Image: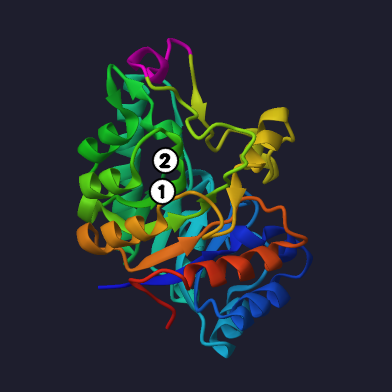
Amino acid sequence: MALKVGIILYSVRDAMAEDGLGTVEKVAELGYKYVEVCNHNALRDSGCGFGIPADELEQTFKKFGTRVVSAHIFPFEKADMAAVLQYNRTLGNTNIVNPMGQFSTYDDLMRQCEEFNRIGKICREEGMTYLYHNHEFEFRTIRGKMIMDYINENTDPQYLSFELDTFWVMRAALSPMDVIRQYGKRIKLIHQKDFAWDSLQPINLIGLTPEDRELKPGEVVGIDGNSDYAKNGKHKVTADRILRATSFTEIGSGIMPIQKIIDAANTYTDAEYIILEQDSTRMPTQLDSVAKSMEGFKKFTGILWD
């Protein structure tokens, strides 16, 4: 088994905002044949987030032999689900990903697990797979147990799978390989970035002690469909986000054990794709960045391009 290398269009979001179809063509010309669409504007746009009609986008992908393998939709639970699913059906996509959640108390988490099952059932009935994409905060604990473990144990594998982001696993002070082994076949897609050796932020974002990792009364982590980000489609510029941006680098340029991650994914999961997600770059353009990451991926074994 080998993972096929893909790219989420979030990696080139600034270019997409300027010229959506032109950027899709440039990504394809670089050699990325498997694409994950990214719509963080789902309150206003049921498509790809950049106002492109489904048939035009589908024809552009078809022209270059590119396959749409997944779509991030945020906030999917507040979007026109039927329209979102129809748009993705036109693209030939069958994977719908919830990019992030918001968590606070045990009772709210249990309610969200019920919601994951409800939405996942809708997707399954429409021939789609619903997946949850983690950040580091899902590895915080409530009552001593990780949020991600609660989600794993309280959702139906028929209705919810995982897109594991190994970068954020590592930033929760965990081994990506261990987490891949733990969740195994629930993992259907892998997100991959690399961590910069000269990051101005430490790797560990959530601490090591049980006290550090436990959510405190009144503490809320993550964001949901009621957030400013959901309403505006962009994060506020804060000192923390500026520091966080320094932690990202192109594939093969940082310190993540990417070959070991690939080997573990091929061994323990049913994931077919490892998808580049480049949140930030210090290179001149996002297209320069994803081109460099492509060359970085070529250093590793256990992957395919076609």
Q: Quadrant of residue 293?
A: bottom right
Which residue is under mark 1?
166
Picture residue at 44% right of the left edge, 56% below the top = 191
Which residue is under mark 2?
170
Amino acid at pointer 2: Met
Q: Quadrant of residue 292?
A: bottom right
Picture residue at 28% right of the left edge, 44% below the top = 179
Residues 293 and 90: in front is 293
As helix, strand or loop, the secondary structure at mark 1 comes to helix
Q: Vertical placement of 190 versus 57: above or below?
A: above
Picture residue at 58% right of the left edge, 74% below the top = 54
Q: Vertical placement of 240 versus 86: above or below?
A: above
Amino acid at pointer 1: Thr
Residues 12 and 281: in front is 281
Residues 92 and 26: in front is 26
Tell me whether the residue at label 2 lies in contact with that at label 1, contact meaning CB atoms closer than 8 angstroms. yes
